[in-house]
Image (cartoon, grey):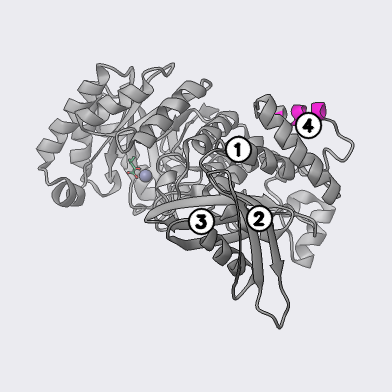
Amino acid sequence: MRKVDVFDTTLRDGEQTPGVNLNIIEKIEIAKQLERLGIDIIEAGFPATSKGDWEAVKRITETVKGCSVTGLSRAHRSDIDAAWGALKDSSEPRIHIVIATSPIHMTYKLKKKPDEVLDTAVASVRYAKKFFPKVQFSAEDASRSDWGYLAKVIEAVIDAGAAVVNLPDTVGYTTPSEYGKLFTYIRESVPNIHKVKLSAHCHDDLGMAVANSLAAIEAGVEQIEGTINGIGERAGNAALEEIAVALRIRNDYYQAETGLNLKEIKRSSDMIRKLTGLLVQANKAVVGKNAFAHESGIHQDGVLKEKTTYEIITPEMVGIASNSIVLGKHSGRHAFKKKAESFGYEMDEAQLNEAFREFKALTDRKKEVTDDDIFSILTEKQTSEPDGKRYELISVQVQYGTNHTPTATVALKTPSGNTAEEAATGAGSVEAIYNTLERLIEGNINLEDYQLKSIGGGRDALAESFVRINKDGVPAGGRGTGQDVLEASGQAF
Ligand code: KIV
Ligand code: ZN
């Protein structure tokens, strides 16, 4: 079976999703989860874009040792220098250089002639090669580029030292057979192509990102790029979990496989959903809530008689069946620690104690504590920012009645350590809480998005809330988890 490398760009292309704004701690936790998933290359960010991105790439490079870490760079020396600063301590420093090759991009965006673009591409790969043992070159908007010109650029960048050549379908425009033919054409017309790995990178504007990626694999690419849950610019990127499962289920056809540990798929999907606030549609393949639900009587009957009648993927394969009751009221700290370790979480004593306290409090209120609940508590603890400059919710109380205006009373600990209390009304209970919080928190706050979701099933399920606000022109996202929806909503704000 042929092995296809998996290049994950959740932290770069995925983070370009409008409204997504991950902090460094969250990015590191995601990178650690991607490592557990078995990703070959993590694109951790775009070091030249901001100090925060540079720092995140550097910290991930220092933290993740089980897979290769890379960073994006335009074909500029200053970008390459910034990437080297962030990536030089990696076990195998790798850079991802991009320049557009389509007539539309060259004319209107770059304002460069094709020959100038070719020279810039070659010069930047050559410059990067002085530092980086591995250089990946991407011809942005390759699918709308002239194939003959693309072949010329690729031959030249390989001569300059590129080790991987990526042909992105940047605007999600291509079709499976066309994309496959592009790779075949490049393989047949670039004389030095055997020196590099070819990579595919697809966007989902026409809903074909996964199909196009699989067509590229059929055409022989050795690397596939995408994101968890398919998040990304506009309609998103190819969903890596779908590609990996398709290769596993249809290995008879594709004769190719990834090195992913498929059992980590559900957990990876949950973490991305939780930390980005981007919900997963119920009918999404592989990780959607309904992906393994059988509703029609005929289907249920078939599945009861023989699962394979209507089920081609088992939930266990992607790590879903683990939702059994695992720890309860009588479980001790040692068992809880072991559970955290089995999720791959390494916590210091203080974090572990706090998470354990929360777990114990939950067992008092919730009959069945599942792996999903524990994973949620641990992720929350592991990604919470150190105390200090933040507001802390002390208590929320809401008076609600069908014929009364909801009124909230909220107590907060302010960043200076004082306790402040206020009350306000709203059209609904959540609005009353948010109006009160707005009175208590300094600055101008605009609520842009609010979501509420239950973790797992059952009437005593934990509530998870996500808000996106804009405070004095600065966008930010927040999460809250709680037994009660109002408490979770207040925490998120
Ligand atoms: O879609 C795209 O073209 C990209 C490049 C930076 C590879 O994300
Ligand atoms: Zn992209």
| Residue type highlighted by circle 2 | Ala
Instruction: Using the rendered view, name the quadrant where residue 48 is placed.
Output: top left
Q: Which residues are magenta?
A: 333-340
- Vertical arrangement, residue 477 with respect to residue 254, above or below: below
Q: CA distance from mark 4 to mark 2?
A: 23 Å
* In this rendering, the label closer to the viewer, 4 or 2: 2
Q: Which residue is mark 1?
A: 248
* Residue with the mark numbered 4: 336
CA distance for labels 3 and 2: 18 Å
The residue at the far right in this view is 330
| Residue corresponding to mark 3 | 441
Q: Residues within 10 Å of mark 4 (few under 14, many from 20)?
A: many
Q: Which residue is mark 2?
A: 488
Residue 189 falls in which quadrant of the image?
Answer: top left
Measure the alpha-carbon separation of dots 1 and 3.
51 Å
Residue depicted at 65% across the width and 27% down the height: 347
- Relative depth, front residue between 441 and 118: 441
Reading the chain from its start, which is encountered first: label 4 or label 2?
4
- Mark toward the start of the polypeptide (1 vs 3): 1
Regarding ligand 2, which quadrant of the image does it lie in? top left
Left or right side of 364 for 356: left
Main structural element of the magenta stretch: helix, strand or loop? helix
Q: x, y (%) of residue 239?
A: 50, 46
Which tag is nearer the camera, tag 3 or tag 2? 3
Camera-side mark, 1 or 3: 3
Expressed as whole percent of the image width and height from the top left, the position of residue 170 reads 33, 48
Q: Visible in this render: residue 189? A: yes
